[in-house]
Image (cartoon, helix red, strand yellow):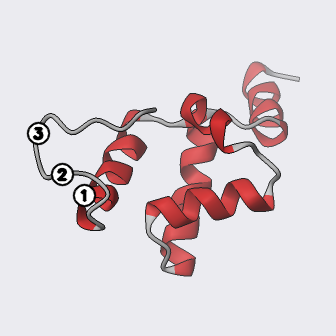
Amino acid sequence: MDKKHVDDIIKDKFLCQSKFAEEIEQLVKTSKFNYIDAILTFCDENKIEIEAVSKLMSKPLKEKLKCDAIELNFMKKTSRAKLPL
């Protein structure tokens, strides 16, 4: 087996940042969820504790989550608004 094949098997078996981001993006596109709902739904369906999500969040996904939070008035519209992740 070559290294790429092994990497693909590992990514399929274990959740990493890129795989998590792909799954969330897919949920947002197909289910018309916002990012907050998509993450909560994904965690519920896959029995992942919500506390573990911060380790799986990529920077672009955090930014999209932040935009959703601002749009839903969960955060103030300041440049200094920070998510507790």
Residue 67: % across, % down: 27, 55
Real-space Cα distance between discs 3 and 1? 11 Å
Secondary structure type for disc 1? helix
Real-space Cα distance between discs 1 and 2? 6 Å
Q: Residue at x 57, y 52 (%)?
A: 22
Picture disc at residue 15: none
Q: Residue at x 46, y 32 (%)?
A: 85
Q: Nearer the viewer, residue 76 or 3?
A: 76
Picture disc at residue 70: 1
**In front: mark 1 or mark 2?**
2
User: Which quarter shows the N terminus?
Assistant: top right
Give the amino acid at mark 3. Answer: Ser
**In front: mark 3 or mark 2?**
2
Picture disc at residue 79: 3
Q: In this figure, which residue is indicated by the disc labeled 2?
A: 76
Crowd rating for badge 1 (residues with CA inside 10 Å; few <14, some 14–19, many 20+) = some
Secondary structure type for disc 2? loop
Which residue sits furthest right? 1
Q: Residue at x 58, y 28 (%)?
A: 55
Sequence-first tag of 1 and 2: 1
Q: Residues at badges 1 and 2 in contact (C-beta under 8 Å)?
A: yes
Residue 34: % across, % down: 44, 69
